[in-house]
Image (cartoon, helix red, strand yellow):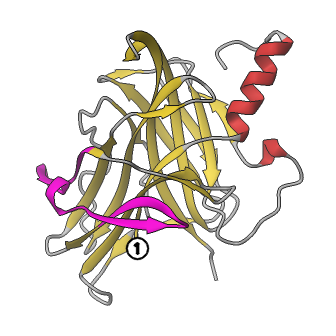
Amino acid sequence: MKTKFLPLAAAILLHAHTALAHFGAIIPSTEVVDSHGPRRLSLVFQFFHPFEQKWMDLEGVERAGYVVRGEDHSLKGRLMPATSHGHKTWKATVEVTRPGDYLFYMVPKPYWEPSERIYIQHVTKTVVNAYGLEEGWDRPLGLPAEIVPTVRPYGLWTGNLFCGQILVRGKPAANTAVEVEYLNENGIEPPADPFMTQVLLSDEEGRFCYAMPRSGWWGFAALIDEEDAMKRDGKKVGLELGAVIWVRTRGMK
């Protein structure tokens, strides 16, 4: 994805990769908590192909929590095992008592993908606003890889532009592929495989933008290939390090 012209074999492999895009996800019960709704937030942590609605097992989580007004709260000991479509997921509940932006994050255990012979680790974020205090959504969390929004990641109408900057170990990731998928809970049938996963490249400062054409949850996964970063059966193998963020759009009625 870092060059415009690819050999045929590489193009075929790239097509196979994007058609089976993996996404880590943190999906909360709402992206905005206000005085008219419940104060308890339910969250599902999962690993899947969102457009195809095909789940995979999320075997374990190395770190999970949320940051609000500069304070980091761990959820690692509060995650409860769950299942979705017959596959392992995790869930948690959080009492939302303080105004501000709640930046939820997850660093999963690396997943071995036998078809690609690499490990996949998608570091995932989702932002929830509480009680109107818009503070913190644009701050990096210091994760191994993350997307820092440059557009407020909530209060989004369908058709709005979402923009972000990709950071890998704190540094901008230039010319990095970003896969975009819709959480297809509506049974949308794509006319061809490329319509399932949108693909774009970040600029020299790691920035990108995408306009979301339908209401619902959208996942953005910036993918960084690190060769020989892991070991399996005594041999060095690659790691697909993903920086993932989820945002929700709503239709204007």
User: Which residue is drawn at the image coordinates 33% and 38% (left, top)?
Assistant: 109
In terms of secondary structure, where does tag 1 sit? loop
Residue 42 inside the magenta-drawn segment: no
> What segment carries the magenta color?
62-91
Residue 73 spot, x, y in % from top left: 13, 55
Front in this rendered view, residue 152 or 176: 176
Residue 72 spot, x, y in % from top left: 13, 50
Count numbered badges in the picture.
Answer: 1
- Residue 7 lies left or right of residue 117; in this view the side is right
- Mark 1, other Cα within 10 Å: few <14 / some 14–19 / many ≥20: some
**Residue 50 falls in image quadrant:** bottom right
Residue 161 spot, x, y in % from top left: 59, 51
Position of the C terminus, as image quadrant, is bottom right
Residue 242 spot, x, y in % from top left: 46, 33
Residue 90 inside the magenta-drawn segment: yes
User: Which residue is drawn at the image coordinates 66% and 63% (left, top)?
Assistant: 184
Q: Is residue 174 visible?
A: yes
Residue indicated by mark 1: 30
What amino acid is found at the position of numbered circle 1 in the picture?
Answer: Thr
- Residue 174 lies left or right of residue 50; in this view the side is left
- Residue 64 lies left or right of residue 208; in this view the side is left
Check the image and name the residue furthest to the left: 71
Please, is residue 93 above or below residue 241 in the view?
A: below
**Is the stretch drawn in magenta largely helix, strand or loop?**
strand
User: Which residue is drawn at the image coordinates 79% and 12% (left, top)?
Assistant: 6
Please, is residue 150 above or below residue 14 in the view?
A: below
Please, is residue 43 above or below residue 244 in the view?
A: below
**Residue 117 falls in image quadrant:** top right
Position of the N terminus, as image quadrant, is top right
